[in-house]
Each structure stands twice: as structure tokens, then as C-alpha cells.
Image: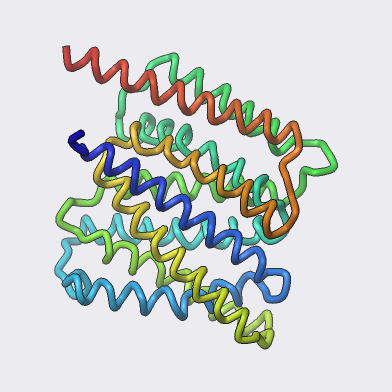
Amino acid sequence: MKLTDNVFGAIFMAIGMLSFTGNDALMKFLFQTISVEQGMFMRGLVSVPLLAVIAYFRKSLFIRIDWRNWRVILIRAFAELASTMLFLNALAQMPLANVSAILQSLPLTVTMFAAMFFGEAVGWRRWSAILVGFIGVLIIIRPGSDGFNEYAVLALIAVGFITLRDAITRRLDQSVPSLFVAFISAIPVFLFGGAMTVTTGWTPVSWSMGIIVTVAAISITCGYLFAVMAMRIGDISFVAPFRYTGMIWAILFGFLLFGNLPDQMTILGTCIVIGMGVYAFHRERVRQKASAT
């Protein structure tokens, strides 16, 4: 079978989700001992130089970029910082599966963003899927229940910034290396963590914690790279639904590391969100076939 750009994009997205979820699980484990800001800084101590070295040897570090692409990169970097800060604070206080379940709305929010700001054609069926998907998100977070708190709100706001990050990536020229984009996006997260650690204080870490941070940094580096490549190489409507694979890993890591399993309502809401995302993906394929004929 010939591997098309869409297939490669789907594979990259699946690998990226495994990398991101593995990083999330390790960081949540670390947050039992250190602050979120210290975790961001320590992880950046490894991931930023690692990205720089890889980019250098791939001849993707010292390059010329026009202002239009720089503007996209800077917007993406801001969205990366905001989403990371919000998401990690939510992750530190919420079960891994629950916060990951909220992220499953991303394919729907990216589709909505592309329709509203990039002029992508979205019919009433996909708009209906987006609406029902958001109902699924409400079932997951359950406003008014004992389990609903400010950290669930942080996770929802993080979804908005991640949507901006992923959608804006499509506006980059293909000539801009993905490694360079990932490197620039990682720098503000690293610097912000370091600056905030000055005020929140430093907790001494053991060698074992240092190893965990290193593995998390390698995982987030892989996530950066594969997420950028996935959103650039394939059709956004095809690639985005493969984010759902991250939920499988979130449940597995959450059980193995923390002994947590999502409750019935979280599972129900997640199934609704994923189901609507898959349906929206199906409708996009139908639309593409109709346009082709």
C-alpha cells in the first residue's frame, strides 16, 4: 500500500499523542513533589538544548524567515506557552484521564476554527457534530457538580489555545522547518518556568526525579516534532481525529501510575466527543469525494 501524506500525517499524530500523553503522565507524577513552574523549567533544560542540537544538525537552526512566517511562529509560540501553563496546572490537580478527555474535543474545535477563520467549508452536519461534541464535554466536566472546579475551566481554556496553536501551524510555508518551529515554541515555556520558579521557590530533586524529567523532556520533544509535522503534511480534517489515540494512553498511564480510572459519566462524555469527531471526519471525506467528482 502506498503511504500518502494523509497516512503519514495520521501516523505522526498518533506518535505525537503517545509522546504527549507519556510526558503528561510523568509530569503529573513529578508534580506530587515539585511545582508546575519548576517542572516546566527542568523539562526545558533538557528539551530546548535537545531541539537546538537536532535542528542544528538538520540545518534547521540558523535560517532566514520572512516576517509573515515569523508572525505565525510567534503567535504559535504564545499559544504554546499559554496552553502549557494552563494545562499543566489543571493536570496537577485533575485525574489524567479526565483532563485528557477534555482534550478530545480538539478535532472539533480545530474544525470550527478552520471554518470560522480560514474559510474551510463546513456543512450543517459537521456543525451539528461540533455542537453535540460540546455537550459531551459538558458531561465530562459536569458544571455544578462536586467534581467541577477551576481546574476544569483551566483545561477548557487550554483547549482554546491548543486549537489556535494547531490551526495557525497550517499558515506556515512548507519551507519553514518543523524543527525550527518546535524549537522556537519551546523557548518561552522554558523561560517562563524559570522566571516563575524564582518566585515560587526551588525544591531539591533526586537523581531518580532527574531521570524522570529527562524522559519527559524527550517525550515532549517528540511530541512537538510529530505534532507540527502531522498538522503540516496531511489534511487537517483527516489528521486531527487521530488525537483520540491519546485517550487510550491516558487511561492506561492513569491506572498504572496513579490507580485512577475514569467514571461512567466521563466515559460517556468521552464517547460522545469521540463519536462526533469521527462523524465529522466521515462527513469531511464525503464532501471531498463529492467535490472530486
Q: Nearer the viewer, residue 75 or 244?
A: 244
Q: Residue furthest right?
A: 146
Q: Residue at x 47, y 35 (%)?
A: 109
Q: Residue at x 48, y 62 (%)?
A: 81
Q: Nearer the viewer, residue 99 or 15?
A: 15
When the figure is inspected, residue 232 is found, relative to residue 55, above or below; the finding is above
The image position of residue 165, as x and y in percent, is: 40, 51
When the figure is inspected, residue 254 is found, relative to residue 282, above or below; the finding is below
Q: Residue at x 41, y 46 (%)?
A: 14
Image quadrant holding the C terminus, namely top left
Task: Answer left or right for 64 relative to 118.
Answer: left
The image position of residue 189, as x and y in percent, is: 48, 69
Task: Answer left or right for 135 relative to 221.
Answer: right
The image position of residue 240, as x and y in percent, is: 40, 38
The part of the image, by quadrant, that contains residue 124 is top left
When the figure is inspected, residue 198 is found, relative to residue 10, above or below; the finding is below
The image position of residue 214, as x and y in percent, is: 50, 76
Q: Residue at x 59, y 56 (%)?
A: 87
What is the total number of numbered labels drawn onto the structure image? Answer: 0
Image quadrant holding the N terminus, namely top left
